[in-house]
Image: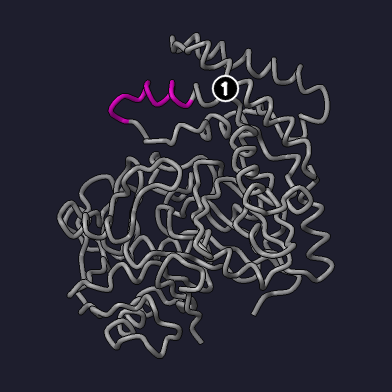
Amino acid sequence: MVNQGKVDVLLGLQWGDEGKGKVVDVLTPNYDVIARFQGGPNAGHTLEFEGQKYVLRSIPSGIFQGGKVNIIGNGVVLAPDLFMEEAKALEASGHELRSRLHISKKAHLIMPTHRVLDAAYEAQKGKNKVGTTGKGIGPTYTDKVSRNGLRVGDILENFDEKYAAAKARHEAILKSLDFSVDSSEFVEVEKKWLEGVEYLRQFPIVDSEHEINRILRSGKSVLCEGAQGTMLDVDFGSYPFVTSSNTICAGACTGLGIGPNKIGDVYGIMKAYCTRVGAGPFPTELFDETGARIRALGHEYGAVTGRERRCGWIDLVALRYAIMVNGVTKLIMMKSDVLDGFPTIKACTAYKVNGVETRDFPYNIEQGIEPVYEELPGWQTDMTKFTSEEQFPKAFRDYIQFLEKELETPIVIISIGPDREQTIERR
């Protein structure tokens, strides 16, 4: 049941790529407004329906459903050129955006020089690279917190002057880093970026915090869409191998301008296994044929970068932690079908940290972590055509019950394939 006059929050509980886009699309008919509260075009939400596949980077995943208003909140960082490319592709496929997609004046702009700075900072780190997508996300959030950022609202007044000052500052930093830039290539990128700024002006640019609170006061419902995953949160993730924003539920308050008392349900999304893109610790990662098989069956490649995702068994230590810091009330399990053919399934229930067993997620998971596994029988049944939970084999029902007991949270939706129809809501 949807909470009228409240915002329900939907976010990832692992290292991202959990399938948030599909679930937002499935849940959108129940809500009046969909709002994205953090992240940038490094987050790719993949949706499949009616034989078509879409990858959204900055636009909320509710854009496909009817005449719903979708809001890009102040916590998002937006690249005008990439936004233009994404929006024009959607318009070409028959989806009207101009009146339904509202953009916060307070969202920060990713400049072309932010991408160059991203590359420069990564090069400086050498073997300690974070493994960013190179989209300029980190430097944009850095400018935001250091009070040097450009915001969407700035394109409405004295923009040329503001842009020139911000660009000059970046060029001085790049000079100090002795990082060379292909000037002819940059000119082309900048030209497209400025074209994107003009395109952005065609959309409703709003004080989104006022808009959302007016919507809530009128008794309507809002679904907040997060990007990345909890374990990439800048405060609570596997730092420093994290993103540059708060991906947890609290980020919905700061990323949209809503009070904590306006939060209704918190939907936490997880895969039936675990994946990670880029560098950073991953306690349950599989380096064997099982990991490769999960990757192949789950088509585990980055929606934005195409990079191979690292694959492993489900990590219940990390999930319990994610449920705790988010205040998750309902769980959604994705990609159960990927494990359909496995004779046994493993789940990490605890860590051994330097030989001492713990169920708590530790400060540092980069070394000295040994996962403690519980092995369960696989269901070895093709579930992709199922339409109700009554059809689930006993072994899969036992797996669900095991997870709910370990995580102390109900699993209310189970995905058994990429299409929106392959979604089963549990009673």
How many badges with numbers are in the image?
1
In the rendered view, how is the structure colored?
one colour
Residue 366 in picture, x, y percent from top left: 27, 45
Tell me the residue at 48%/83% (across/down): 426
Quadrant for the N terminus, please. bottom right
Task: Identify the magenta region.
Answer: 118-128
Q: Picture quarter containing residue 290? A: bottom left
Residue 375 shown left or right of residue 362 in the figure: left
Tell me the residue at 26%/58% (across/down): 312
Question: Which residue occupies the extreme bottom position in the image?
Answer: 390
User: Is residue 301 depicted above or below 343 in this figure?
Assistant: above
Residue 15 in picture, x, y percent from top left: 40, 52
Residue 27 in picture, x, y percent from top left: 60, 70
Task: Return the residue nearer the eye: 417 or 11.
Answer: 417
Q: Which residue is mark 1?
A: 189
Whether 281 is among the magenta residues is no
Tell me the residue at 66%/64% (across/down): 65
Residue 404 shown left or right of residue 297 in the figure: right
Q: Picture quarter containing residue 291? A: bottom left
Can residue 261 be seen here? The reply is no
Can residue 138 be seen here? The reply is yes
Residue 43 in picture, x, y percent from top left: 50, 46
Q: Residues within 10 Å of mark 1 (few under 14, many from 20)?
A: some
